[in-house]
């Protein structure tokens, strides 16, 4: 198995999982400067925000970094469902002094688009990763044309084979323990979802591209176990939430430090 360090030009075979809502460029910069692959989550960001964050990254590190996007089909807004949850939560909004009108309607995450690609083109990020499959072929070709390494998550062997067939450079084998979004995209059958250390060796056997393990890995022993099962590297999220560069809230920091 080709080592992740060679493929991505990093010192440590560790990718910091992109975590929208609890980090920005600061964490990505810190991880990249420490020798891993820092990641910038972009699904909750506007093109202007992405541009500003990439400008910051470029001024504070010369090391490789990753930008991450979703590839889901945006849901159609449903006014009745929107009204129902707002009504259900209204008593709690009143209790805690929250103005429900300040909560935006509709989905909070946008799929990868040509507008986002227009921003990225000026920066030609070393790595672009996707969640929930891959973007349409024309968008994927734009990314490939910049020389960016393309990475995406698979939650089953079938998804890993699909990603390889569509030209990804690296497959992330995302086990059930992963703290972030389920990357499932070929099916909505949750019975197909298995643990990281059951999924990982199956994916390693099924594809020829390097495989990164993700889900429940938070220390050196977990990294060693993944590498022993054939992983080229690991993607870790939760372990970075206590970093000073993360924007994790005080209540969540306290929970992470507790038993």
Image: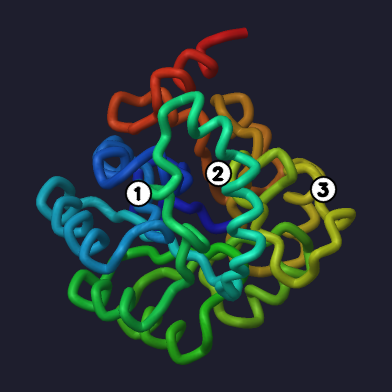
The residue identified by callout 2 is 234
Location of residue 123 in the rendering, given as x and y in whole percent from the top left corner:
20, 69
Above or below, comparing residue 219 to residue 80 in the picture: above
| Quarter of the figure with the N terminus | bottom right
* Quarter of the figure with residue 69: bottom left
Could one spot residue 56 in this view of the protein? yes
Could one spot residue 204 in this view of the protein? no
Q: CA distance from mark 1 to mark 3?
A: 29 Å
The residue identified by callout 1 is 10
Location of residue 20 in the rendering, given as x and y in whole percent from the top left corner:
43, 48
The residue identified by callout 3 is 194
Name the front one of labels 2 and 3.
3
Q: Earlier in the sequence, mark 2 or mark 3?
A: 3
Towards the viewer: 89 or 240: 89
Q: Residue at x 57, y 70 (%)?
A: 77
| Quarter of the figure with the C terminus | top right
Q: Residue at x 27, y 68 (%)?
A: 47
Q: Secondary structure at mark 3?
A: loop
Q: Point out the residue furthest to the right here.
A: 191
């Amino acid at each position: 198995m080709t080592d992740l360090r060679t493929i991505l030009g990093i010192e440590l075979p560790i990718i910091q999982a992109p975590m929208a809502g609890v980090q920005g460029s600061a964490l990505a910069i810190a991880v990249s400067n420490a020798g891993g692959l820092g990641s910038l989550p972009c699904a909750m960001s506007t093109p202007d925000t992405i541009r500003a964050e990439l400008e910051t990254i470029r001024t504070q590190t010369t090391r490789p970094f990753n930008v991450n996007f979703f590839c889901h089909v945006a849901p159609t807004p449903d006014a009745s469902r929107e009204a129902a949850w707002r009504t259900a939560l209204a008593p709690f909004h009143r209790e805690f002094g929250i103005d429900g009108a300040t909560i935006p309607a509709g989905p909070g995450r946008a799929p990868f688009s040509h507008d986002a690609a227009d921003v990225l083109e000026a920066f030609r990020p070393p790595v672009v990763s996707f969640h929930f499959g891959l973007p349409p072929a024309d968008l994927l070709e734009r990314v490939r044309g910049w020389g960016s390494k393309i990475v995406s998550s698979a939650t089953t062997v079938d998804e890993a084979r699909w990603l390889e067939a569509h030209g990804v450079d690296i497959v992330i084998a995302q086990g059930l323990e992963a703290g972030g979004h389920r990357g499932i995209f070929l099916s909505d059958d949750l019975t197909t979802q298995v643990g990281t250390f059951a999924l990982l060796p199956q994916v390693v056997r099924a594809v020829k591209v390097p495989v990164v393990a993700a889900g429940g890995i938070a220390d050196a022993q977990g990294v060693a176990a993944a590498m022993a099962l054939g992983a080229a590297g690991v993607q870790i999220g939760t372990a970075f939430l206590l970093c000073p560069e993360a924007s994790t809230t005080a209540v969540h920091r306290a929970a992470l430090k507790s038993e």
